[in-house]
Image: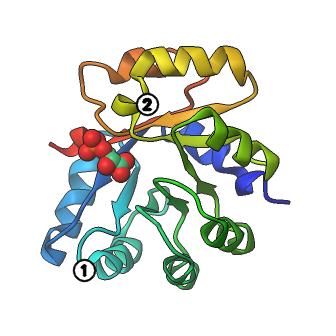
Amino acid sequence: MSKQFNIREVLSKHTIIPVVNITDINKVESIIETLTNQSINCIEITLRSDIAFEAIAKAISIKPKEFKVGVGTIVNAKQVSKCIALNVDFMVSPGISNEVASAFEKSKIPFLPGVMTPSEIISGIEKGWDTFKLFPFNLAGGIKALKTYGGVFNQIKFCPTGGLSENNYEECLALNNVISVGGSWVLK
Ligand code: 3PG
């Protein structure tokens, strides 16, 4: 199976992914409400705060059925195990290691590995993957990088994140090799 467990299906239904660092558990409900009011039915909660897993568990327990709760900033296998236990909808990493790659593959949960360079894309292709987070989008070369990668790796789809804003996300989404976009600007 794998092919990243149908991550493309998740991303094609959720083309704008709010990347959110939750530091106050009492805000989980209002964050989900704010997003659903904007017809955004997903969130990527990052593992960058002490209460991240608590916030993820709460989001899963109160979310509407169609709303997808993903986890971002995954950097080790232990975090993947916690995601499996919580039954999250998708997982995102800023980059990839052998440890994280094999935990992702065993999870059966849709996952989006981070890449920035051609060599990292080729390593991912060798693992059988075809959909990546391009991170950090602004440092990787922005729109120019996406266009260049589109010519070189024409089967690959990207979700650029890192430095996106309301001023450039639509230009990204218009590219053939962009399946979705993510960032913290969505909730600001
Ligand atoms: C991520 O983890 O995807 C990024 O940190 C989001 O970057 P942004 O804050 O620049 O949108």
The quadrant of the image that shows the N terminus is: bottom right
Rendered image: mark on residue 106 = none
- Along the viewing direction, whichever of 126 and 37 lies nearer the viewer: 126
User: Label 1: few (<14), some or many (≥20) within 10 Å?
Assistant: some
Q: How many labels, in total?
A: 2
Asked if residue 104 shows in the view, the reply is yes
Question: Which residue extends farthest front?
Answer: 119
Counting from the top left corner in percent of width and height, residue 187 is at: 20, 45
Counting from the top left corner in percent of width and height, residue 148 is at: 58, 15
Q: Which residue: 76% across, 43% down?
A: 125
Q: Which residue is mark 1?
A: 51
Q: Which residue is mark 2?
A: 140
- Along the viewing direction, whichever of 119 and 157 lies nearer the viewer: 119
Position above or below: 49 against 175:
below
Q: CA distance from mark 2 to mark 1?
A: 30 Å
Image quadrant assignment for residue 53: bottom left
